[in-house]
Image (tube, rainbow, N blue to C red):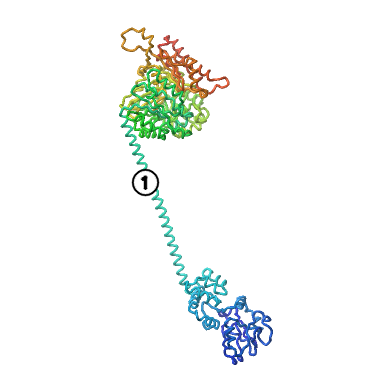
Amino acid sequence: SPCPCDSDVLPGRKANSLYSSLQRLLAGPKVSNRAGDKNYIVQDSLLAFGAPPCCREGSTWWPGGIGRDEKPATYHNIYNILIRHVASDALFFQTILSHSIFLTCTSSCLLQSPYVTPVQMSIARSSDFCFMICNGILDDTASDFLAFKQRFFLSWGSILSFLEHLLKLLKDYAVPMAVVNSQKAAELAVALELEGLPTLESLLSVLENEESVRDLVQRPGQRYKGQNGTEMAAIKIQSCWRRFRTRGDYVKYRRQRWAAGVIAISWLLHAQMTRMKKALKESRKRHLEMFHTRAKLIFLLLIPSGFSLPQRLCVTDLDIEQNLQMGRLCDIQDPDVDVIYVSPVQLGDDLLQYYHRLLRLTSDVSDERVKIITPEAIDHFRTHSMCLSTLLKYSPRTLKRIRNLIRGRSAYIVGGVLHSDDLDVADALGVPILGSAPQVAQLYGSKSGSKRLFSGAGVPVPPGAYCIYNQQQMYEVLAQLVTSNLEVKCWLFKMDNECGGWGTAYCDVTLMKSYKWALKEFRRYGFEKWSNLWAQEPALLHILEELPGFLEQHVQLVTKVRFSSWDVFLEAFLSQGGVVEAVPPSDSITNLTVDMLVEPNGEVSMMSCGDQIHAGSPFQFSGSTVPQSSMEPTDLHTLCMRIGETCKARGVLGYFSIDFVTFLHPRTMQQQVWATDLDLRYSDQLSMTQLMLMMSGGTLDCRSSSLEVPLPMSEVEGEAFGTRHTPSSCRYAVMCPHLRHTNLSMVQYKVFLHMCQALGVGFDIKVRQTINAVRISLTIADHLQGALMTFARNLSAIHQEISAPSMQGESNFQGLIKDIEGILGIAVKNQASAEMPTENLGTETTSAHS
């Protein structure tokens, strides 16, 4: 009959059940009835292995073989069992059970069964007890489990606790089948008894099919197929939702916390910045209060300063330019005044000796009364364009020395264009500044500010516009100015911070086609009708259309030191603002400069006045002739006083200079005067004037435009006795503080002085006629023509002496000589036409200065 093992369904199991599709496991053989009758111990032992019914009665059990044959166990492959049939010796079976020997059936049907799997093979190879757990349920009546329990009954409490955890794991993850290695389970249960709950890895390590169970446990969602899977899924969903909601709240909290941190930091920075601004504001206010308080007192100490920042950026030799006012040392002629001169360059011993001898020419001046100091910060900031007051601010040793020198003495500072560093220096030294406040200097020290101040004073100014910051605005303004003032042929563009001509450009509008057409329209309408806007509108539109391209091609720069083209100039012009003004429509133009002083007590006075001399360009100041002789002194004095009173009313204090231009109007042939510029600082002309007055011993009366110099002793003896006043004569001086020659840098001072002495260039104390040439040049003569001729002759001699045919160098000597020759030529023509003596030149020489 067929063996029950041939069936696909295990005995005792229903078909199509959960376990019917599983592979059959190999079991031990069942003992025959005969063996059971002979020995009940054998029967019980074999039944524990669940031997299949294929082991028929009559089978022989012996070590190495099974069945009716006596072949060794290797003949039946690995499925043979190592049991010998013993009928009466129960001790032998106990020994076999203690070594956990599996009993297998070697019948032909079992060897050929398709249900033998690798898992079964691995179990068969094991030398330990193994029992199965199906769907997380342990059959505690199974023979293999009973044998396992019987063997490890001494430590069964720990094993039972461990099995509970294992069963819970298998139920939670719905593991259909797990094979437990009893030996590993027992050892691990005892080892984990004192360590707490077993881990997942420790639970899986006791399974023979660990890999398959591990894959099943690690499969996503498997947990929710086991026991309480629905509850666990609900808990998981709730936890994920809580985590999502909590995460959102946390992210929101972190974002709010970050925003709160940013707001807090911003607020702290704002509060700190506010405190700092408040402290700086109080400091500046205190400085200004001290400035105004000290300015009401009488202090007599001189500390010169430098240029503003835009001016410093355009000056090539800043230290030399700032040192052009060495004539301030001449304030030492007052016996109650000591001078401290802060020099931007380190002066050599030979030059210091020269200046000390120069100061002792007219009076006995002690060297202790004159101190020339150089700030130590010059050595540290050679590449920085810092003005003298800034360098002095960062020179603590120099400040300490100055404080020691002025201790117990009254003092005040006379500087350049004031800014915050001048206030810091004044506050550090505890002395006032004779000058305008920085805000006032910034407002009225620019070109646009000067136009605003001239308008307030009611003085005549050239046609033009100021505060121009837009290109289209500039085109429209210039087109309107050209249309309204067709007699003006040239127009100037000046930057607000311009100084020395570097920020000036000009254009000749007579080259415009639309200008020529506008002249025809002007002649057609006449002067009276042309003043109406309807007559000017067509010409205005034509000029405005042509103007952008015309300026691009025909604008000329006075100097290309900083700006190389019109585009670069225009960009800087619009960025800082500027003015557009007319050049006088005349061939005979004279520029003159007047130096003014508004004292702390409110008194306004004229300090110097002179006609300008130009080298090369008519828009760059190089020197002047003192006193001025280009217009009526009374008219000039009236204009200057009006401007001075307006400056005083608007907070301007200290020294400042006013530039005028005078010319003959081509239509009326009357002399006109325009106020063109205002410079709020101690000028180079005033410095040279102080030097000239000290060396000549004369006095300058700006109200009458006369320079009175005491006569020599030989001429005084010829005067009548009984005269109360010291006899004097009217003199003229030519001063040029801006003489430049590159070859002079290769000549030592001593050599240059000996060369001047050999050329007859020196100072005659008796006749008080001189030329002094070290960085500055000064000539004094009986009349204007003589002074100009002497000055030009000495310049020519010095130029020939220091120049060679192959090395002429760069200088403005030739330009000055040419301008002086032009002045002398026109003066001779005017003198011949007027038939006036040379020494009585006055306002008649107005047209001579061009």
Expressed as whole percent of the image width and height from the top left, the position of residue 17 reads: 56, 80
Residue 361 occupies which quadrant of the picture?
Answer: top left
- The residue shown at (49%, 20%) is 752
Total marks drawn? 1
Give the image location of residue 509, x and y in percent. Answer: 49, 25
Q: Amino acid at mark 1?
A: Ala
Q: Residue at x 32, y 29 (%)?
A: 408
For the residue pair 631 and 85, the one nearer the viewer reads as 85
Circle 1 residues within 10 Å: few <14, some 14–19, many ≥20 = few
Choose top left, top right, bottom left or bottom right for residue 522.
Answer: top left
In the picture of the structure, the residue carrying the numbered disc 1 is 271
In the rendered view of the protein, which quadrant contains the N terminus? bottom right
**Image: 557 above or below 268:** above
Q: Is residue 792 visible?
A: no
Using the rendered image of the protein, determine whether residue 445 is visible from the camera's viewpoint.
yes
Q: Quadrant of residue 287?
A: top left
Image position, residue 823 (x, y; %) = 46, 16
Q: Position of residue 674 (x, y in %)?
A: 40, 23
Q: Quick one: SS at disc 1?
A: helix
